[in-house]
Image (tube, rainbow, N blue to C red):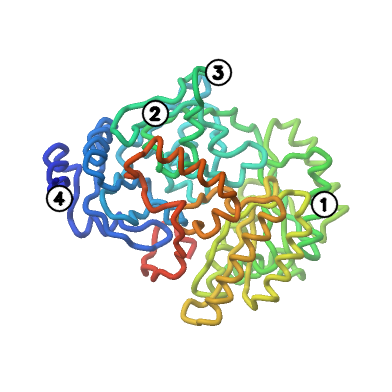
């Protein structure tokens, strides 16, 4: 049987310069935004999609672990090669073609999400899923974890925009799930099985995306409230009126205080540190004008204060509050457990009360912000890594958080996925029978367990690992 070095040498003979075995190249591909490093033996940067078939055929034959990588923006350790082996870096596979008549985008997996949006906009179309790292993250990575973003409540998440996928099975065989048509009912829906599977069932190389018409106009409103419960109660009254904002972002008091200190500006004069809701309406001019009146009446009735943007420049000033809060949180601790949980709307107030209690019980700062239109909240448990008491409190807090979220009928992740970071909580969400069913699917499609092994099902407490001291382009800090 060949050694791993011999297999890698064989791959290099077949694919040449696309295979990098240098120390520098392997180190750069050894971690993602979780900043936990696991060195691979080689990094393959395919020039053609067919190169991936060659990689997988050889890897499957010799049981070489293969981890797929877009840009590494994932926070969950999903793109970290925990078992070593080979990393497939998709960045060269980045073609984008817009079918302006059909309202579809034909893209390769390495295409950057923001670039897809820009290409669609040229033709009057809109691709709504917008992760905060959209200027860097790739559509293949978005598909792998079923990414969402601020537009999720009105438009949906990545899964809702995938018409068809193509890629390779672990054996190196090319497959296509669906076609570039708006209807497809021919056989099992394996397309959706790949979406959110975190590169564990196959490697996506291309996709056909659904586009929607570009909104004619947008309008932005920033509102403040006395406390978190008041804010969450108020937004439910707006939703009950069947008003569906394109974006509905919530920042609690701690998040607002962090943003205010980072910008040196008070969001509302005389109301420092009040929780806020940032709304954006989008649609036709007449639709937005009608809804604007209804939203302003709602703000007058429920909010402590509100400010509307009179121009896109003013809207950008309001959005600065949301963009600054995450990075500014590091003044509260040098480490963060960033949990993107989902809470059912009916339990918003109950969750707000629970979170206030968790902060008091843990003695930690837990600034929280997120997307109220779909209940996807980012709960940031801040602590000091060198402080044993702090670390213990953070570990207990995140465990309690996950148990409570599931008890409230929610989800342990809305858009980040499981990867390594959320493996301790998978079995809080899923029963033994459900986990066995997922493992059976994995075994059926990847019997040699070569694709992204060591993820999802094996428990890893990622916060116990030493993090690399590196700054990535998309870091908030």
How dense is the environment of label 1, judged by Cα within 10 Å: few (below 14), some, or many (20 and up)? many
Q: Do the residues labelled 4 and 3 touch (CB within 8 Å)?
A: no
Residue at image mark 2: 166
User: Where in the figure is residue 173, as x and y percent of width and height?
Assistant: 30, 28
Residue at 57% x, 33% y: name it.
160
Residue 215 lies, with reference to residue 200, above or below; the image says: above
Residue at image mark 3: 183
Residue 371 visible (yes or no): no
Nearest to viewer (mark 4 / mark 3): 4
Please, what secondary structure does the residue beneath circle 1 have? helix
Please, what secondary structure does the residue beneath circle 4 have? loop
User: Where in the figure is residue 443, as x and y percent of width and height?
Assistant: 40, 40
Residue at image mark 4: 3
Report, in whole angstroms, how far the alpha carbon at label 4 lies from the one at label 1: 67 Å
Q: In which quarter of the image is the N terminus?
A: top left
Q: Which of marks 2 and 1 is nearer the N terminus?
A: 2
User: Where in the figure is residue 344, as x and y percent of width and height?
Assistant: 72, 49
Report, in whole angstroms, how far the alpha carbon at label 4 lies from the one at label 2: 31 Å
Report, in whole angstroms, how far the alpha carbon at label 2 lies from the one at label 1: 47 Å
Q: Do the residues labelled 1 and 3 touch (CB within 8 Å)?
A: no
Report, in whole angstroms, how far the alpha carbon at label 4 lies from the one at label 3: 47 Å
Residue at image mark 1: 299
User: Where in the figure is residue 361, as x and y percent of width and height?
Assistant: 69, 76
Of 276 and 193, nearer the camera is 193
Residue 238 lies, with reference to residue 119, above or below; the image says: below
Report the residue that reaches farthest toward the right.
301
Nearest to viewer (mark 2 / mark 1): 2
Q: Do the residues labelled 2 and 3 touch (CB within 8 Å)?
A: no
Residue at 22% x, 53% y: name it.
41
């Amino acid at each position: 049987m060949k050694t791993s070095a011999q297999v890698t040498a064989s791959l290099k003979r077949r694919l040449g310069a696309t295979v990098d075995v240098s120390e520098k190249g392997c180190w750069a591909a050894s971690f993602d935004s979780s900043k936990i490093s696991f060195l691979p033996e080689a990094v393959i940067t395919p020039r053609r999609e067919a190169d991936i078939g060659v990689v997988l055929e050889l890897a499957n034959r010799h049981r070489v672990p293969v981890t797929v990588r877009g840009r590494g923006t994932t926070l969950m350790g999903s793109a970290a090669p925990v078992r070593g082996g080979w990393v497939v870096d998709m960045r060269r596979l980045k073609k984008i073609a817009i079918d302006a008549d059909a309202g579809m985008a034909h893209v390769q997996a390495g295409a950057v999400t923001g670039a897809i949006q820009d290409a669609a906009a040229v033709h009057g179309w809109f691709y709504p899923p917008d992760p905060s790292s959209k200027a860097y993250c790739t559509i293949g990575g978005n598909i792998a974890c079923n990414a969402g973003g601020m537009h999720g409540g009105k438009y949906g998440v990545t899964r809702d925009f995938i018409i068809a996928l193509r890629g390779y099975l672990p054996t190196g065989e090319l497959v296509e799930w669906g076609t570039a048509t708006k209807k497809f009912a021919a056989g099992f829906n394996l397309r959706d099985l790949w979406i959110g599977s975190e590169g564990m069932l196959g490697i996506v190389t291309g996709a056909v995306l659904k586009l929607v018409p570009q909104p004619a106009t947008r309008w932005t409103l920033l509102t403040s409230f006395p406390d978190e419960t008041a804010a969450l109660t108020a937004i439910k009254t707006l939703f009950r009126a069947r008003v569906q904002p394109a974006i509905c972002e919530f920042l609690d008091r701690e998040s607002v205080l962090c943003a205010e200190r980072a910008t040196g500006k008070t969001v509302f004069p005389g109301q420092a540190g009040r929780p806020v809701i940032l709304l954006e309406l989008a649609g036709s001019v007449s639709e937005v004008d009608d809804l604007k009146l209804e939203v302003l009446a709602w703000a007058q009735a429920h909010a402590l204060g509100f400010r509307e943007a009179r121009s896109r420049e003013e809207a950008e000033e309001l959005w600065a509050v949301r963009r600054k809060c995450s990075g500014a949180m590091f003044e509260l601790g040098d480490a963060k457990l960033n949990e993107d949980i989902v809470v059912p709307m009916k339990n918003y107030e109950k969750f707000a009360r629970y979170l206030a209690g968790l902060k008091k019980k843990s003695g930690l700062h837990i600034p929280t912000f997120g997307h109220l239109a779909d209940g996807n909240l980012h709960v940031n448990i801040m602590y000091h890594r060198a402080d044993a008491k702090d670390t213990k409190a953070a570990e207990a807090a995140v465990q309690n958080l996950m148990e409570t979220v599931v008890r409230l009928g929610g989800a342990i992740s809305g858009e980040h996925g499981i990867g390594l970071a959320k493996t301790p909580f998978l079995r809080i969400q899923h029963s033994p029978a459900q986990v066995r069913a997922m493992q059976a699917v994995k075994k059926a499609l990847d019997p040699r367990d070569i694709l992204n092994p060591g993820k999802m099902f094996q428990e890893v407490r990622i916060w116990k690992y030493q993090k690399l001291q590196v700054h990535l382009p998309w870091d908030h800090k």
